[in-house]
Image: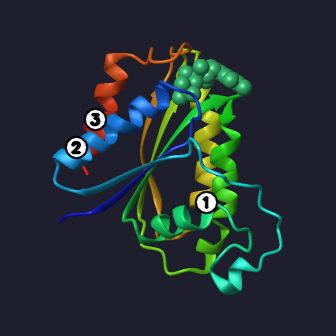
Amino acid sequence: MKKRVLVLSTSLRPHSNSHLLAQKFAQGAQEAGHQVELISLQGKDIRFCQGCLACLKTHRCVIQDDANAIVERMAEADVICFATPVYYYEMAGQMKTLLDRANSLYTSDYNFRDIYLLTASAEEEDSASDGPIHGLNGWIACFEKARLAGVVRGGGADAPATISADKQAEAYQLGKQL
Ligand SMILES: Cc1cc2nc3c(=O)[nH]c(=O)nc-3n(C[C@H](O)[C@H](O)[C@H](O)COP(=O)(O)O)c2cc1C
């Protein structure tokens, strides 16, 4: 069955390692016949959640920036894949800000079921990605129909465009098996 796949790439760095993983995941999903959209947060205006909770009633954030359009795409997607650099053993702040700004989804009729995570970290150890996984699982726990379906822990990549071919292949395969 053809799925709507949304890949959200959250690094703001040119030639980003996690963005390379995002592109590979998107390529795999596309080649598997799915409808794929890749959105990068580069150049996007996404401000912090103000905590007013108006979104729970209106299903839309009161802040007029680029977040609402992305959140609409999140609600429509069957599969969401997040790509993030590891910053201080956590997901990057811009990914967390996007999750907070997606709070309207909590009371919305969302479609997504399978959630994927692609990380890039300087450290080679898999444990470098434990924080982002834990953080994303906290978000997923608020959506009872969703689950974390797969992760690529992209360790050992510090300088831009140094993520290994093996990790890129892993991301491609994850997209391909959707
Ligand atoms: C603010 C900041 C914090 C970082 N913290 C970590 C860290 O805790 N652990 C780690 O392994 N790498 C850390 N790094 C390195 C990045 O995760 C690494 O360069 C990664 O490849 C960046 O991904 P990107 O190219 O997709 O932006 C940090 C980098 C920055 C800029």
> Label 1's element?
loop
Marks 3/2 in contact by CB < 8 Å: the verdict is yes
Marks 2/1 in contact by CB < 8 Å: the verdict is no
Q: Position of residue 152 (x, y in %)?
A: 43, 33
Distance from Cα at disc 1 to Cα at disc 3? 28 Å
> Label 2's element?
helix
- Quadrant location of residue 55? bottom right
- Asked if 141 appears above or below 159 in the picture, the reply is below
- Asked if 158 appears above or below 133 in the picture, the reply is above
The residue tagged 2 is: 176
Q: Which residue lies at the image location 68% right of the left edge and 49% below the top edge?
A: 96
Q: Position of residue 124 (x, y in %)?
A: 53, 14
Q: Which mark is residue 84?
A: none
The residue tagged 3 is: 172
Distance from Cα at disc 3 to Cα at disc 2? 6 Å
Left or right for 91, reference 6? right
Q: Position of residue 71 (x, y in %)?
A: 55, 65
Q: Is residue 127 visible?
A: no
The residue tagged 1 is: 66
